[in-house]
Image (cartoon, helix red, strand yellow):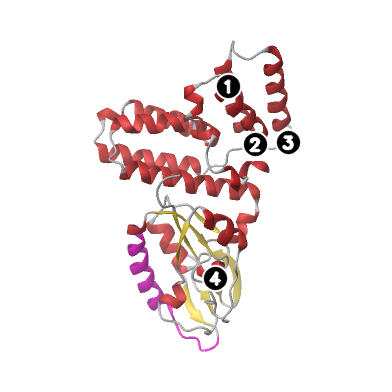
Amino acid sequence: MEGTMKIGVSPCLLGERVRYDGGQKSDGYIADTLGRYFSFVPVCPEVECGMPVPREPMRLEGDPAYPRLIARGSRIDMTHRMRQFCDRRVAELASESLCGFILKKRSPSCGLHGVKVYREGMAARSGSGLFAAALASRFPLLPLEDESRLGDPCIRENFIARLFGRHRWLQFMADGPTHGKLVAFHTTHKLLMMAHSPLAYREIGALVAHGGELPPARLFNRYEELYMKALGLHATKKKNTNVLQHIMGYFKGRLTAMEKGELLQVIGLYHDHLVPLIVPVTLLRHYASRYDHPYLKQQIYLYPHPAELMLRNHA
């Protein structure tokens, strides 16, 4: 894919020794596998705001909606210092054209969900790290994920689909967007949108159809919002099966009886959880090429990300 695809990441996940105890939490999938396709923008809020390595461990306290960052032993309040850093750093990240961000789970600065917040001596996993919260507030459409959740094949598939989806959108905007170009962009994404959200598929279609009546900035902002929110919804077995059957309709009158029977069987096996999504998709790619179907050959749904990532081998 053309262009530089950049994702933010907590540097401890890349093997940098920036944790409070001088350690690291290297993640091979992030560093080695995703590193083949994305360039990393590492951000360690605690080190970058001037805290040493090693350092006193910290925790969140008080109101989960607006917690304080407190050093556990000395009880020094680091909240103001951290919030000042977050305001500055997230503003800087606006120029990086990030496709997403992978954060360290349960960190009082980087944890996205389920961070312990202490209140009157009791702890509840109800908070977000201060930097993660600032990031989510400033970039509500940016794909964000805790590294631990990427071990779940469905979550990993969805997150990486969002990364590539955002990259395609950033490229579209960088290439001088027009309503005509948006029609072309949307055409290639129709089946992908249908797989993630049939409702968004219809809403986005109506938006594009009447896009010439809207100011360009409003049109592109609204499309981005609907597009990224749709990608944030998981493409379930039921929705994928519907899209696979929909694609099959494009071969009406062209498939032989044997080919049609084989395709129906493979889609049924996928629906019944007996084969992964890559099996019917590969067969449909073959037919799109064999019967030279131009519309299907340009559909992102059939070619969403590099095969080497093997994302649809488990979904």
Cα separation between marks 1 and 3: 27 Å
Identify the mark nearer the N-term, 3 or 2: 3
Residue in the picture at 47% in, 63% down: 132
Distance of mark 3 from mark 4, alpha carbons? 37 Å
Q: What is the C-alpha distance between the residues marked 3 and 2?
A: 12 Å
Residue neighbourhood size for the residue with mark 1, other residues' Cα within 10 Å, grouped as few (<14), some (14–19), many (≥20): few
Which residue is at 63% across, 45% downward?
Answer: 310
For label 1, the residue is 290
- Name the residue beneath numbered marker 4: 12
72 vs 309, nearest the viewer? 309
Region of the chain picked out in magenta, as a range:
73-94
Which x, y percent locates residue 97? 37, 54
- Give the distance between the C-alpha atoms of the residues marked 2 and 4, in whole angstroms: 33 Å
The residue at which mark 2 appears reads as: 278
| Residue 315 visible from this viewpoint | no
Q: Where is residue 182 in the image (x, y as percent from the top left)?
A: 34, 33
The type of residue carrying mark 2 is Ile
Amino acid carrying mark 3 in the image: His
Magenta segment includes 168: no
Mark 1 and mark 2: Cα distance apart in space: 18 Å
Q: Is mark 2 on a helix, strand or loop?
A: helix
Between the residue at mark 4 and the residue at mark 1, the CA separation in whole angstroms equals 47 Å
Q: In this view, does 89 lie above or below 53?
A: above
Please state which amino acid type lies under the numbered disc 4: Cys
Give residue 232's mark: none
Quadrant where the N terminus sits is: top left
Residue 238 placement, left or right of 94: right
Residue 91's image quarter? Answer: bottom left
